[in-house]
Image (spheres, rainbow, N blue to C red):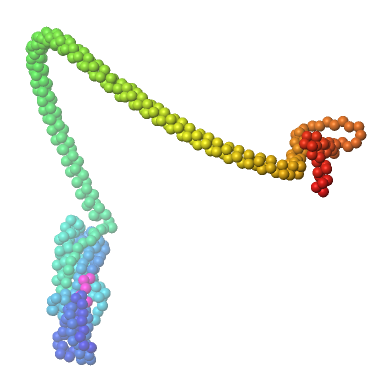
Amino acid sequence: MGFVTCGPNEALVVSGCCYNRNPLLVAGGRVFVWPCLQQLQRITLNTMTLKVESPSVYTVEGVPISVTGIAQVKVQGQNKEMLLVACEQFLGKSEEEIRHIAHETMEGHQRAIMGTMSVEEIYRDRKKFSEQVFKVASSDLVNMGITVVSYTIKDISDANGYLMALGMGRTAEVKRDARIGEAQAKSDAQIKEAIAEEQRMASRLENDIQIAKAQRDFEVKKAAYDKEVNAKKAEAELAYELQAARIKQQLREEEMQIQVVERTQQILVQEQEIIRKEKELDATVRRPAEAEKYRLEKIAEAHRQRTVLEAQAQAEALRLEGEAVSFAIEVKAKAEAEQMKLKAAAYQQYNEAAMMDMLMQSLPKMAHEIATPMSKTKKITMVTSNGETGAAKLTGEVLEIMTKMPELVKSLTGVDVSKSMRGIK
């Protein structure tokens, strides 16, 4: 099996080889166990809470009551002798079985102690009852290896109302004592209140007397003070009026001085204003007028110079243009004269042929001049009896005029245009 361990809330019991007479007890530790030669058992060391109820137990006076107590018990593991006794008693038993045995033992001792005490003792002195139960139960459970850790009463009750009656009597006594105390307190309070009221009234009367005395002294002193104050006030008023007159006189003199100073200052201000206005006139009128005059003079001078220069330029241009025109006219005249000379020579050389050429060149112009008045006529009214009418009539008239041209030429120049035309053919 080897080494076996256990927690602090249990103990190991080893018996068998080497431990035949006294077993080995190990509380919270480890031990080596030989398999098949030794036997290992465990016993719990946990603290167990017991609810010890003792219903309807008759006290020494024969009154049945019920008591409920709470106890904590455990197997003592630190004391080897007690642990050995516990092992003899409970080894092999479960924790619940140990709890049951301890509970029954505690309940029996609790009933026994209840039978030896009266209800009043148990109700009023619970500590004494708990100590007796703890003492008796501990001495009995120690023999089984169990220690009683603590014991206390949780509840005391009865089915017949005995405890209630005790409470009612005590309650009545307390109420009675409370009423007596309250009445005594009220009486004391009233007595003290009357004494305080008497002292208050005496103090008030004394205060009223002191106030009246103080008021009288105040009125006497006030009358004296008022008399003195009125006298001083009259003197002060007279002195005030005199001082006021003096102050008014001084004020008049100072006002006169002020007026003189003001007049002087006004004169100075007016002089300065005149100077300022002259400077302003110079700055705003004279100087701008002089500047404008100078500007206009310069502009006029520039305009005059420009006019002179323009006139000179124009005269020079006219001169040059006259010279150019004269030269052109001269050249043109020379050209025309030369042309006329050439025409004259040609006319002399060709005579009739030249005249025919000029006539032929002039015929279209003559026809144009003849037809132009008709083309500008807006409305023509023609009255005919027989023959052509309208445009044909006008065309015929133009042609008729043109046919008369050779006769006119012949009469003017002596040249027979028709004969010349036939000669050209």
Q: How many marks?
A: 0
Dominant secondary structure (helix, strand or loop) of the stretch shown in magenta = loop
Residue visible at 8% across and 16% down?
217
Looking at the picture, tell me which residue is in the foreground, 289 or 323.
323
Please check the rendered image and state whether residue 254 is part of the magenta-colored stretch, yes or no. Answer: no
**Percent x, y for residue 390?**
85, 36
Asked if residue 143 shows in the view, the reply is: no
Image quadrant in which you'd find residue 96: bottom left
Nearer to me, 17 or 154: 17
Tell me where residue 9 sits by quadrant.
bottom left
Q: Which residues are magenta?
A: 44-48
The residue located at (13%, 33%) in the rendering is 192
- Judge whether 390 appears above or below 141 on screen: above
Identified at 14% across, 35% down, the residue is 188
The picture quadrant where one finds residue 306 is: top left
Q: Position of residue 181 (x, y in %)?
A: 16, 41
Q: Is residue 108 left or right of residue 378?
A: left
User: Which quarter of the rendered picture does the N terminus lie within?
Assistant: bottom left
Q: Position of residue 321 (x, y in %)?
A: 52, 36
The image position of residue 315, as x and y in percent, is 48, 32
Relative height, residue 95 to residue 151 (above, below): below
Compared to 222, does 149 lie above or below?
below
Residue 316 showing in the rendered view: yes
- Residue 46 versus residue 176 in the image, above or below: below
Q: Nearer the viewer, residue 346 or 258?
A: 346
Which residue is found at the position 17% from the left and 80% from the top? 29
